């Protein structure tokens, strides 16, 4: 009998995930990279983009919808612009290749734009902004997920958008970058998945039914399912809602237009093969501001913002990325919490791929 496990150390979880993808046909390097990014999302507190995705990724790999160990094709290559075809490779492999192209051009020109199309699920978009920030670059990313029709535009009850994330990264000397990174839906679909498996609940108005009523019932997305049954995003009659009323809906549309239509990925539509498209801009602040006012001005300004009087006693203003940074520190020290159902499905995926999971069938390693 497998022990009911709620918390696992990241350094136990990551090798397990790596072994699953390696056994499923990815090279060791790719498998370990996928594992690092998925566990990294859990560490950042975004369980929706963490190891909960493993069974789906494996299924997509088995169905030939995601391909192992791809090298991108650069279809358009000017000094400041690239169009990159991810060829349906794992997002954790092809997205960093596209970001590297953007970084290389930005190093030379001070500015670059990269359109990535046909990428497997690229996970937490912040990972790619953090990669650019590590080089000292500001970056902006508009992303869509072709085929993943989940979100109703403001004023409608019918699905038209993907959860189309938007992300901006700003490096700050001597500390973690500012990283604004969110789905343009009230919650990412994975958060509904996690909630349906017994994880954190979603907001009461995250979904909308065909009758126009808002709800947190995940059946509006997946239809009827049993506790251990498959969640099929095509089965529900409702939709996710965009955040921020007409403003979030407008941003979602622009993510579809730039990340989908302009990138060549295709804007979201029913029946399209799943692929993330990402339109990214990279800017070298040192080339814009040789006098280096920018770093000091950012430091001054975030200090000013953080000193705003809290709305609630004991509250504080958090900067984009700050919550993730704190969650990472906490989870690195105390382990990654997983819903029992997520863990059970993960072990099933491991067994299915032929990975020996006997070491997990006893009590988990205790945490301090
Ligand atoms: P979210 O609603 O948790 O918002 C996260 C953002 O808000 C972060 O920038 C965070 O620092 C900031 N934030 C959180 N709490 C804050 C507070 N109290 N004060 C100030 N700022 C705060 O994120 P989400 O919409 O659930 O998205 C989760 C992840 O899903 C993201 O990483 C996104 O990239 C990813 N995603 C990916 C895809 C894809 O197709 N690959 C699709 C949708 C979402």
Image: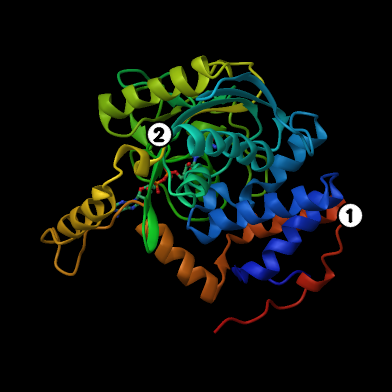
Residue 131 horizontal/vertical position (percent):
52, 48
Residue carrying label 1: 354
Q: Is mark 2 within 8 Å of ligand 1?
A: yes
Residue at 74% from the left image edge and 63% from the top image edge: 15
Q: Which of the pair 130/195 is nearer the observer?
A: 130
Asked which secondary structure carries label 2, the reply is: loop
**Which labelled disc corresponds to residue 167?**
none
Report the side of 274 relative to 65 (left or right): left
Residue carrying label 2: 185
Residue 165 horizontal/vertical position (percent):
45, 34
Asked which secondary structure carries label 1, the reply is: loop
Q: Residue furthest right?
A: 354
Mark 2 is surrounded, within 10 Å at the Cα level, by few (under 14), some (14 to 19) or many (20 or more) other residues, namely: many
Looking at the image, is 315 positioned above or below residue 147? Answer: below
The total number of labels drawn is: 2
Q: Which of the pair 250/258 is nearer the observer?
A: 258
Is there any visible trace of residue 273 in the rendered image?
yes
């Amino acid at each position: 009998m497998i022990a009911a496990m709620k918390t696992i150390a990241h350094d136990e979880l990551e090798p397990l995930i790596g072994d699953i993808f390696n056994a499923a046909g990815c090279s060791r390097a790719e498998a370990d990279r996928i594992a690092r990014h998925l566990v990294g999302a859990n560490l950042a507190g975004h369980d929706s983009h963490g190891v909960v995705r493993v069974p789906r990724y494996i299924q997509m790999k088995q169905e030939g919808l995601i391909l192992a160990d791809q090298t991108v094709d650069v279809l358009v290559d000017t000094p400041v612009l690239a169009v990159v075809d991810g060829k349906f490779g794992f997002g954790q492999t092809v997205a960093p290749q596209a970001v590297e192209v953007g970084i290389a051009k930005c190093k030379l020109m001070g500015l670059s734009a990269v359109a990535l199309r046909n990428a497997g699920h690229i996970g937490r978009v912040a990972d790619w902004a953090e990669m650019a920030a590590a080089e000292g670059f500001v970056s902006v990313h508009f992303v869509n997920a072709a085929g993943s029709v989940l979100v109703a535009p403001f004023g409608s009850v019918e699905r038209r958008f993907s959860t189309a994330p938007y992300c901006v990264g700003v490096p700050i000397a001597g500390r973690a970058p500012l990283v604004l990174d969110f789905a343009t839906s009230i919650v990412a679909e994975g958060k509904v998945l996690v909630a349906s498996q017994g994880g954190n609940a979603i907001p009461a108005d995250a979904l909308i039914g065909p009758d126009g009523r808002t709800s947190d019932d995940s059946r509006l997305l997946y239809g009827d399912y049993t506790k251990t049954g498959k969640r099929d995003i095509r089965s529900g009659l409702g939709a996710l809602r965009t955040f921020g009323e007409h403003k979030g809906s407008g941003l979602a549309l622009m993510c579809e237009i730039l990340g989908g239509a302009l990138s060549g990925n295709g804007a979201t539509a029913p029946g399209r093969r799943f692929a993330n498209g990402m339109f990214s801009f990279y800017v070298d602040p040192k080339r814009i501001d040789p006098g280096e006012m920018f770093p000091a001005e950012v430091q001054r300004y975030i200090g000013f913002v953080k000193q705003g009087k809290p709305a609630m006693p004991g509250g504080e203003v958090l900067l984009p990325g700050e919550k993730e940074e704190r969650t990472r520190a906490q989870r690195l020290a105390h382990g990654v919490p997983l819903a029992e159902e997520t863990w059970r499905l993960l072990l099933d995926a491991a067994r299915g791929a032929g990975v020996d999971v006997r070491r997990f069938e006893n009590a988990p390693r205790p945490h301090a």
